[in-house]
Image (cartoon, rainbow, N blue to C red):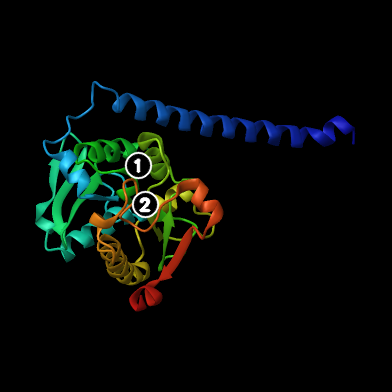
Amino acid sequence: MKPKALYQPLLSLFRCLKKLLDVAAMRRLLNRVINRVLLSNLFKPTMEIGAEIHAHNRRKLVVGLGNPGMDGTRHNVGAAVLGALAARLSAADRWRGNRHVSGEVITLDVQDTGVVLLRPRLMMNINGVSVAKAAEKYGVRAEDVLLVHDDLDKPLGKMVIKHGGSARGHNGVRSCVDCLHTDVMPRLRVGIGRPTGKTTVDRHVLGRFSSEERKILDSVLVQSVDLILSLLSPLESPKNSQPGQSSFPPAGGKRAAQSSHKDKPLDCVTAAQS
């Protein structure tokens, strides 16, 4: 066999990989452009009267990332957690569409802490537009925004608190980082596991939980809500926090990630004991 013929399959594979990488890069660039356009002054909402006062009281924003109209899918487990949280707070019937933030919102107090619950009504790849608009409208600092989202790298039944840092390949988180211009937002990462067999990642995340998975999911939602409520009511009052300090557990973004433990894993058993 001639050397050229020997290397031809490798060259073809390299060209295919290059095209795939180019497509992924173009998709990320397009999402970034869309984020910027939707956040331009033309679409910029007016901050609520009194939002600056709420900022001094350290109002918090809890966001369930997901796709509109895709309830019940693995990719929307963050939105499912928000629904369970609203039900626990006896506020399930208080969701209201808000065109200024491109999402559904509930505002309430949790043990003297002002809280905004947000379910974006934009596609996952541009969820950050809704989050940034809500943060501005309600006077919430980036470090007081809690993102709740699915995590392929964790099995169903495991939850992880991540204190800032990179998006780790999650397009919804990447959009939030891009739109808020920072990566300090704490996250509750809810495991959904990776696909098995020949199932693609896209088909897996956009698919619905099986009957066996739903049995685990019920416990996951309960424990996720317990965890969020513990974060919303820290032992130290937000009023005692120093200016610029998050009233969630410390979020330090990339720098903190390099100098401390970034993740705190929990499964349904350990969460119940905490």
Q: Is residue 231 above or below residue 121?
A: below
Dot 2 crowding, Cα within 10 Å, few <14, some 14–19, many 20+? many
Q: Is residue 169 rendered to the left or right of residue 117? A: right
Q: Which image quadrant for residue 267?
A: bottom left
Q: Amino acid at mark 1?
A: Met
Q: Is residue 43 above or below residue 244?
A: above
Q: Quadrant of residue 93?
A: bottom left
Check whether the beta carbons of the residues at disc 1 and disc 2 lie within 8 A of each other: yes
Quarter of the image for the N terminus: give it. Answer: top right
User: Which of disc 2 and disc 1 is earlier in sequence?
Assistant: 2
Q: Secondary structure at mark 2?
A: helix
Residue 200 in sight from this viewpoint: no
**Kind of residue indicated by mark 2:** His
- Which residue was labeled with disc 2? 75
Residue at 64%, 35% (x, y): give it: 17
Badge 1 is on which residue? 124
Q: CA distance from mark 1 to mark 2?
A: 9 Å
Residue at point 35% right, 42% down? 124
Name the image quarter holding the C terminus. Answer: bottom left
Q: How many marks?
A: 2
Image position of 12 (left or right of 30): right
